[in-house]
Amino acid sequence: MKRLDLLDETDRQLISLLQVNARESIAELARKLGVARTTIIARIERLEKNETITGYTVKLGQNVLSSELNAYVGITVQPKSNQAVVVELERIPEIQLLCAVSGEFDYVAWVKAINPEQLDHLLNQIGNIDGVMKTTTSIVLARKIDRSAT
C-alpha cells in the first residue's frame, strides 16, 4: 500500500492540486508549484507508472439531478466473523467503499443504489450475511463539503 506521507512535498502538493482539478494545465501546475513544466510531466508520469495515481474522473455537481441514492451502512459483525463477512461484502458491486472503523460499528460501507427498492434489497442482502448482527443505514441527503476524487 502506498503512503502519501512518504512522498516528497512537491509530489504531495501536485497530487493535492490534481485532486482539486485534474484538468489543470501542466503550465498552471508548474506555476503554482514553482517548478519547470518538464518536472510536472515527469512527476505525473512517475506517479501514474508506480500507481500512486491510478486514474482521473468526473465529479457531477450537486445540482445535477440523479435518481441514485447514496447511503452509509454501519455494519456490526459477530466476533471472529470479520473475514467471512468481508468476503461476502466484496461480492456486492453496489458497495463502493468498505472501511473497518472503531466505535459503534465494525465496518462502514458506502452504498450506491438506483432507487429505494434496490437500496432495500441491498440492505436485506447485507443483513442476511452469516455473521452480520446489525446494520444501521443513513441515506445521504446532500453533500456539503466534498474533497473526494469521486
Image (cartoon, helix red, strand yellow):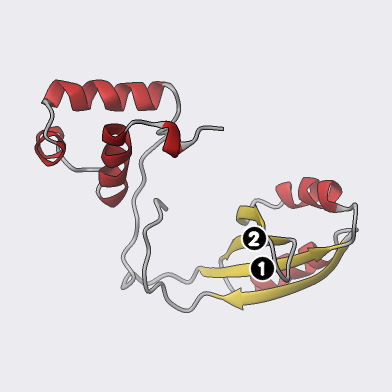
* Residue plotted at (75% across, 61% down): 106
In front here: 74 or 113?
Answer: 74
Kind of residue at badge 2: Ala
User: Which quadrant does the N terminus fall into?
Assistant: top right
146 left or right, relative to 111: left
How far from the left and from the top, in percent, is residue 25?
Answer: 14, 38
Residue 116 is at least partly visible in this image: no
Q: Which residue is mark 2?
A: 109
In front here: 6 or 42?
Answer: 6
Q: Which mark is residue 5?
A: none
* Residue plotted at (90% across, 52% down): 80
How far from the left and from the top, in percent, is residue 91?
Answer: 73, 47
Asked which quadrant contains residue 113, the reply is bottom right
Of mark 1 and mark 2, the one earlier in the sequence is 1
In front here: 36 or 62?
Answer: 36
Give me the C-alpha separation between circle 1 and circle 2. Answer: 5 Å
Asked which quadrant contains residue 147, the reply is bottom left
How far from the left and from the top, in percent, is residue 59?
Answer: 35, 56
* Residue plotted at (81% across, 67% down): 127
How far from the left and from the top, in percent, is residue 15?
Answer: 32, 40
Q: Are marks 1 and 2 in contact (CB under 8 Å)?
A: yes
Kind of residue at badge 1: Val
* Residue plotted at (64% across, 54% down): 99
Helix or strand or loop: what does disc 2 sit on? strand
Q: Which mark is residue 73?
A: 1
70 left or right, relative to 62: right
Residue 101 is at least partly visible in this image: yes
Helix or strand or loop: what does disc 1 sit on? strand
Number of residues whose C-alpha sits closer than 10 Å to that of mark 1, classed few (under 14), some (14–19) or many (20 or more): many
Q: How many marks?
A: 2
